[in-house]
Amino acid sequence: MKFYWITILAVLFFVAGCKDDDGPMDCTDCPDQDIIVGPYEPVSYSLEIPEWINAQPIIPTDNALTVDGIELGRHLFYDPILSSDSTQACASCHIQEKAFTDGLNVSKGVLGMTGRRSSMSIVNMAYNNDGFFWDGRAESLEAQALLPVEDHLELNESWENVVEKLRRHPDYPQLFRKAFGLEKKSEITKELAVKAIAQFERTLLSFDSKYDQVVWRNDGEFTEEEEMGKSLFFFEQSQLVNHPGCSHCHNNGDRFFTNNKYFNNGIEDVDDLTAFPDYGRGEVTNSVYDNGKFRAPSLRNIELTAPYMHDGRFQTLEEVIAHYMSGGHGVENEDSNIKMFPLTEDEQAAMIAFLKTLTDEQFIQNPAFSNPFE
Ligand code: HEC
Ligand code: HEC
């Protein structure tokens, strides 16, 4: 009798061996386990872009937007499955109500350790043509999304494990099939995961602030204060030699509020170009002249993304304006548009009132951008 049970158990173990409860999945012997059944009916997705936007969104030819691709990307963006201890997702440091920043000076990863830089807003990324991150080290959104997972100061997980978890998950194989037509779980890869995340990120467009309504839709008007701030920002009427000059860098056709270029905007007081605490762009180009340069971020939703600068050194917009008024520190590669300029208290308040017209309530409330698990 005992022998009989042992034989049965042995047979059961043999069968169970084809399942993949422990250890890495090796499905070569059991193809049935690997097959994903379910629909694949791709529906292409067009971004809703106002007609007054005069530039084309950048969408790689090998990653066209589809409804299901975006939906998969949204799930991955919000899912702590991407982190080593299942506590953090991309969305932990990119929170919708803060225009996809995290409100911290510098971000904190799963190990509780802080990184060296401040989280960035994920807004109008489809129009960024000159590198991602403060220093531009990632060339595409796809390339960017590969990095946080394995960064020890962020999600601290290996892609190998993430892919394994996704293949075993009750829902993700179906979502990957819907998005990319996969036939087998073993076809799920990190490359497809980041394609989906990038698709979702390309939908995060913000073109519906008060500024857009007044300037581009002829809907409503600025207050006198906002109007004054606007002329200072764009130095419209100002023939002054020393003007704030903001729109030299934070502008592109009065629409994007960044030119996506790299500058030293004068925040660091260092003796020479090798003394910057963070080399920024110089780390990427290896040119000493680029040390201390960072990407001029878009000022859209700037009211929501404090603290400010790559290291979160300024807590308020008042401090930011005070910095620019002071004219920087005269470091060799400081941009020539960083000059001391006088502003009255009313003018400073007006600039801030103008910057607040760039807040887009639709963007931070859009249910399509929110957590799909809630
Ligand atoms: C621990 C916090 C943290 C997590 C988790 C995190 N990020 Fe970030 N993110 C940052 C920080 C900090 C930066 C700026 C880093 C730098 O410039 O070196 C950044 C930058 C970015 C940028 C660049 C934006 C721009 O304008 O160039 C994108 C896009 C982005 N993150 C997407 C993601 C995605 C997708 C994930 C998940 C796969 C993710 N982030 C996870 C903190 C985080
Ligand atoms: C020479 C180009 C240049 C000019 C002129 C300029 N900026 Fe900037 N701005 C930058 C760069 C580059 C950064 C990022 C610097 C960093 O993080 O180290 C930045 C950062 C900012 C930030 C913080 C953004 C964030 O997400 O943390 C604000 C706010 C800002 N600038 C507002 C202004 C205003 C208002 C003016 C005009 C008074 C102005 N800037 C003029 C290049 C410029």
Image (cartoon, rainbow, N blue to C red):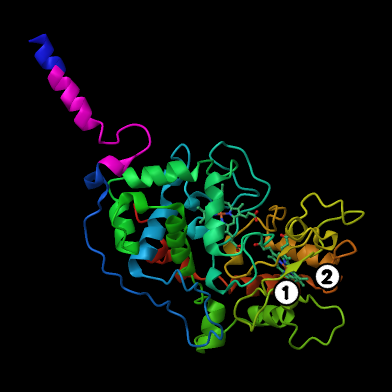
Q: Residue furthest right?
A: 271
Q: Secondary structure at mark 1?
A: helix
Who is closer to the viewer here, 67 or 207? 67
* Mark 1 vs ligand 2: CB below 8 Å: yes
Residue 164 appears in which quarter of the rendering?
Answer: top left
Q: Residue furthest top?
A: 2
**CA–CA distance in space, label 1 to label 2:** 10 Å
Split into quadrants, the picture shows ligand 1 in the one at bottom right
Question: Is residue 99 among what the camera can see?
Answer: no
The residue depicted at 33 percent of the width and 31 percent of the height is 22
Who is closer to the viewer here, 25 or 248? 25
Q: Secondary structure at mark 2?
A: loop
**Residue that numbered label 1 is attached to:** 249
Residue 23 in picture, x, y percent from top left: 37, 32
Rendered position, 54 above or below 279:
below
* Mark 2 vs ligand 2: CB below 8 Å: yes
Rendered position, 361 above or below 30:
below
Residue 24 in picture, x, y percent from top left: 38, 37
**Residue that numbered label 2 is attached to:** 335
Is 371 contained in the magenta span?
no
Q: Is residue 352 left or right of residue 344?
A: left
Magenta stretch bounds: 7-29
Residue 151 in picture, x, y percent from top left: 58, 45
